[in-house]
């Protein structure tokens, strides 16, 4: 006979993956006394059997994890470092047995914001233990139904335990972090799939994990002329027609490795990759160095997803207090390792909404709408980032230019927006959404496709070097010195300084691109190109005005409050040139030594 219990919480989180655990920890750290239950059916042993895409972080997720969640020491001690992204294209597709057979872009130094590779299973188990210690209730069971209620009425979650008992959880706030089960998405018809709804994105994925590999097959670690960091501990991307592959180390001891492909159905038939034997055969012929690397190790597991991408139809954060985060909301492609960064934006947004609503803040609804507008816009921006990817991935010239362009925006706007928590500022979000560049990007991708159709070689852009554009610019460069000066208080980072310089370097990149691809006549043949260039410079100028206004508004303020307090306190400091007395082992007091004298030897 089934028994049923009932319990009330402030927040119920459905799903114990990285999104759910990050959400729980962030709420526990920011809302004192909050009552949270997290529902997940998996045992710890099952969690360790990784069956999800996403095994590395980049700058936004890294800042969130080790600054906002206080996990830097944990990552240093338990997860391998990620020394940026490296990119490799075969010089001759029929010869790929060694790294010398590839044109490569190596990250040539450690990135300014450290990030990490992720063993997802180990991370999720450890986070769950940490969250339970902080007071989270872990409900081991399966969500069989949810009753979504309007307004501030409690939502009801029906859970079935492994023993067959039922539990009913009630909470004002409900977070769906249960991934591709789409618990709320199916209830509300809020999931979009298929290339017709995803800017043409039609991708699948296949991957294998192995251990005890001989990593010297990839690289022996010696590259004195090109690099001051590790090649192996970067996330390495290998390119070919209609696909790219990742190579990600998952630990520093067992030499375990994840190697997987994102492929586009318009160019690659997924049925040719849907078993480990087929995948290995594909690697042997197209990326033999990876095949040799995998063959040197022992297989742990194999995964195949015929379809990857989806996004929300109408909203991520409802006025009725439900929220979708992580894969329950959207995923596009693993190319830039942005999955955990999209989680960081969403989780920090949900915490801000919940905190304000639980406190009865009258401005909570505006924050909710701002956060939903931003995260919905961001979901579309991330999906559109992979428009026409399948056509371009294998072209080293065109794709290197595209990566450089998209990196300008990533480091110039995405990272500082998160670092300054500008995604939670209503005025900034309205201004940002009014100046979305998605239409220009679509036009640019068409022009890149035109160059591929013509077989045009426009050179090889290295996104890490400082000799590609003007003024020693390189894409990881920041302009507000927010890292150097630890400017983390929301709104203090001068986002407009970052935006103005970003638009300027986008203009410089675009001018160089048009000249390389179409010659000087390119601006005459299509006057829109000159108009785009002028618009970028105009946007840079407008942002510069806002930059100066921001500086004027905060003139005289110390942008890091703890530093300001330290400097204020230090004004009363006086050096005291003596030691405090202490007792010798014999119990006798130590002899006082006057200042300016030396004791006998």
Image (tube, rainbow, N blue to C red):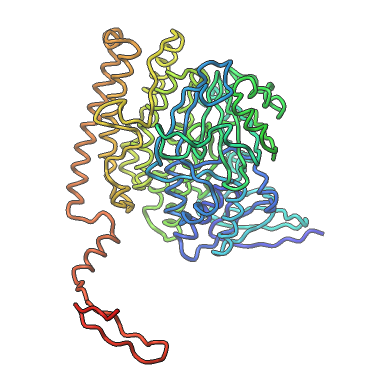
Q: Residue at x 72, y 53 (%)?
A: 160
487 sits to left or right of 229:
left
Of residue 217 and residue 304, the one placed in the foreground of this image is 217
Q: Residue at x 54, y 20 (%)?
A: 240
Total numbered labels placed on residues in the image: 0
> Vertically, is 418 above or below 472?
below
Residue 485 location, x and y as percent? 28, 51
256 sits to left or right of 492:
right
**Image quadrant in which you'd find residue 261:** top right
Q: Residue at x 57, y 47 (%)?
A: 252
Residue 503 location, x and y as percent? 28, 30
196 sits to left or right of 44:
left
> Vertically, is 398 above or below 113?
above
| Quadrant of the rendering where the C terminus is positioned | bottom left
Most extreme residue toward the right is 1
Of residue 90 and residue 42, the one placed in the foreground of this image is 90
Of residue 129 and residue 435, the one placed in the foreground of this image is 129
Most extreme residue toward the front is 601
Residue 199 location, x and y as percent? 49, 24
Of residue 458 and residue 175, the one placed in the foreground of this image is 458
Residue 75 location, x and y as percent? 51, 52
Q: Residue at x 29, y 25 (%)?
A: 469
| Quadrant of the rendering where the N terminus is positioned | bottom right
């Amino acid at each position: 006979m089934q028994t049923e219990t009932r319990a009330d919480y402030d927040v119920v989180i459905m799903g114990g993956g990285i999104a759910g655990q990050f959400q729980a920890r962030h709420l526990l750290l920011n809302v004192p006394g909050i009552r949270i239950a997290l529902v997940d059916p998996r045992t710890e042993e099952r969690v360790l059997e990784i069956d999800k895409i996403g095994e590395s972080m980049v700058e936004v997720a890294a800042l969130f994890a080790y600054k906002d969640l206080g996990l830097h020491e944990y990552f240093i001690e338990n997860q391998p470092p990620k020394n940026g992204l490296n990119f490799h294209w075969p010089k001759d597709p029929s010869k790929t047995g060694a790294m010398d057979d590839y044109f490569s872009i190596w990250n040539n130094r450690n990135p300014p914001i450290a990030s990490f590779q992720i063993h997802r299973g180990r991370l999720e188990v450890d986070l769950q233990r940490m969250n339970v210690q902080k007071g989270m209730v872990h409900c081991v069971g399966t969500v069989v139904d949810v009753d979504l209620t309007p307004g501030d009425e409690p939502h009801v979650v029906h859970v079935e335990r492994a023993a067959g008992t039922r539990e009913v959880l009630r909470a004002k706030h409900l977070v769906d972090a249960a991934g591709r089960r789409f618990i709320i998405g199916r209830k509300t018809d809020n999931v979009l799939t298929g290339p017709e709804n995803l800017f043409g994105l039609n991708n699948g994925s296949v991957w294998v994990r192995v251990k005890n590999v001989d990593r010297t097959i990839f690289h022996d670690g010696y590259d004195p002329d090109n690099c001051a960091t590790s090649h192996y501990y970067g996330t390495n991307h290998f390119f070919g027609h209609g696909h790219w592959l990742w190579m990600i180390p998952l630990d520093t001891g067992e030499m375990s490795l994840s190697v997987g492909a994102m492929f586009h159905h318009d160019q690659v038939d997924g049925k040719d990759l849907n078993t480990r034997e087929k995948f290995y055969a594909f690697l042997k012929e197209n990326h033999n160095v990876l095949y040799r690397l995998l063959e040197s190790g022992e297989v742990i597991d194999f995964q195949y997803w015929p379809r990857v991408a989806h996004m929300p139809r109408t909203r991520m954060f409802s006025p009725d207090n439900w929220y979708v985060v992580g894969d329950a909301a959207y995923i596009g492609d693993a190319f830039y390792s942005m999955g955990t960064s999209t989680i960081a934006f969403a989780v920090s947004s949900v915490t801000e909404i919940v905190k304000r609503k639980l406190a009865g803040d009258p401005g909570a609804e505006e924050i909710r709408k701002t956060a939903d507008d931003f995260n919905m816009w961001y979901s579309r921006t991330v999906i559109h980032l992979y428009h026409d990817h399948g056509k371009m991935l294998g072209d080293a010239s065109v794709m290197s230019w595209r990566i450089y362009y998209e990196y300008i925006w990533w480091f110039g706007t995405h990272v500082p927006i998160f670092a300054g928590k500008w995604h939670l500022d209503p005025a900034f979000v309205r201004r940002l959404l009014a100046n979305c560049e998605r239409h220009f990007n679509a036009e640019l991708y068409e022009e890149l496709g035109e160059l591929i159709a013509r077989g045009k070689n426009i050179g090889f852009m290295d996104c890490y070097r400082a000799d590609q554009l003007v003024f020693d610019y390189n894409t990881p460069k920041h302009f507000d010195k927010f890292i150097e000066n630890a400017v983390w208080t929301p709104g203090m980072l001068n986002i407009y300084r970052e935006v103005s310089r970003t638009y300027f370097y986008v203009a410089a990149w675009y001018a160089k691109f048009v000249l390389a691809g179409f010659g000087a006549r390119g601006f005459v043949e299509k006057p829109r190109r000159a108009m785009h260039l002028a618009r970028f410079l105009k946007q840079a100028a407008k942002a510069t005005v806002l930059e100066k206004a921001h500086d004027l508004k905060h003139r005289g303020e110390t942008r890091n409050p703890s530093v300001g307090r330290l400097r204020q306190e230090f004004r009363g400091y006086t050096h005291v040139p003596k030691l405090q007395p202490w007792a010798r082992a014999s119990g006798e007091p130590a002899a006082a030594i006057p200042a300016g004298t030396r004791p006998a030897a």
